[in-house]
Image (tube, grey):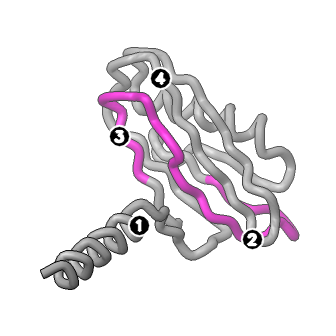
């Protein structure tokens, strides 16, 4: 009985560890951040740009309550431009999408949503 309980506990622990680990996407030279709906509260979005073989860059962006998806995209674009510098091109597409593209010899990178304290505003990140 104790051996079986130990096996079940070990399996559950392994599952929890796997679920707690962040999933890493394939590095890319171009990412799309899709914003939908309206921010219901004041909050922040924290994105991590992790270039291959370089230190990651965390970008925190404050979004006010009642900000539409298009205005939130503008705020996010400006924040990313200020934080990332010349190695990246950041632009708006379709009004509510933010594109991040590497420039020149800048390495491919992963983009992850570290945290969002916003409700209402949906954030989706994908390769473009």
Within 10 Å of the Cα at label 2, are there few (<14), some (14-19), or many (20+) other Cα atoms?
some
Which numbered dot is residue 4? none
In terms of sequence position, does the residue under pointer 4 or pointer 1 come before the other? 1
In reply to whether residue 91 is colored magenta, the answer given is no
Confirm or deny contact between disc 3 and disc 2 (CB under 8 A): no
Give the numbered dot on residue 17. 1
Local secondary structure at mark 1: helix
Which circle, 4 or 3, is nearer the viewer?
4
Frontmost of labels 2 and 1 is: 1
Q: In terms of secondary structure, where does tag 2 sit? A: loop
- Range of residues picked out in magenta: 100-124
Left or right, residue 6 beside residue 24: left
Point out residue 67 in the picture as x, y percentages from the top left corner.
42, 20
Q: Which residue is mark 2?
A: 52
Q: Separation of disc 3 and disc 1 at Cα? A: 27 Å
- Residues marked 2 and 1 touching at CB (< 8 Å): no
The mark that comes first in sequence, 3 or 1, is 1
Q: Which residue is mark 4?
A: 43
Q: Where is residue 92? Give x, y as percent.
A: 57, 43
Whether residue 96 is situated above or below residue 4 in the rendered picture: above
Front position among marks 3 and 1: 1
Q: Are marks 4 and 2 in contact (CB under 8 Å)?
A: no
Please report the residue visible at 45 percent of the width from the left and 40 percent of the height from the top.
Answer: 96
**Dot 4 lies on which element?**
strand
Circle 3 packing at 10 Å, graded few (<14), some (14-19), many (20+), is: some
Quarter assignment of residue 112 = bottom right
Residue at image mark 3: 122
Earlier sequence position, callout 3 versus callout 2: 2
Cα gap from disc 4 to disc 3, whole angstroms = 13 Å
Q: CA distance from mark 2 to mark 1?
A: 24 Å
Between marks 4 and 1 in the image, the one whose residue lies nearer the viewer: 1
Image marks 4 and 3: residues in contact by CB distance under 8 Å: no
């Amino acid at each position: 009985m104790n051996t079986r309980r130990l096996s079940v506990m070990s399996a559950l622990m392994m599952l929890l560890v796997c679920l707690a680990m962040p999933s890493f996407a394939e590095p890319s030279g171009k990412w799309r951040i899709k914003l939908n709906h309206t921010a219901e509260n004041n909050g922040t979005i924290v994105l991590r740009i992790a270039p291959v073989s370089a230190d990651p860059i965390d970008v925190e962006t404050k979004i006010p309550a009642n900000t539409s998806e298009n205005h939130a995209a503008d705020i996010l674009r400006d924040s990313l431009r200020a934080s990332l510098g010349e190695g990246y091109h950041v632009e708006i597409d379709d009004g509510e999408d933010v594109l991040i593209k590497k420039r020149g010899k800048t390495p491919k990178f992963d983009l992850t949503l570290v945290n969002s304290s916003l409700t209402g505003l949906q954030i989706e990140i994908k390769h473009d």
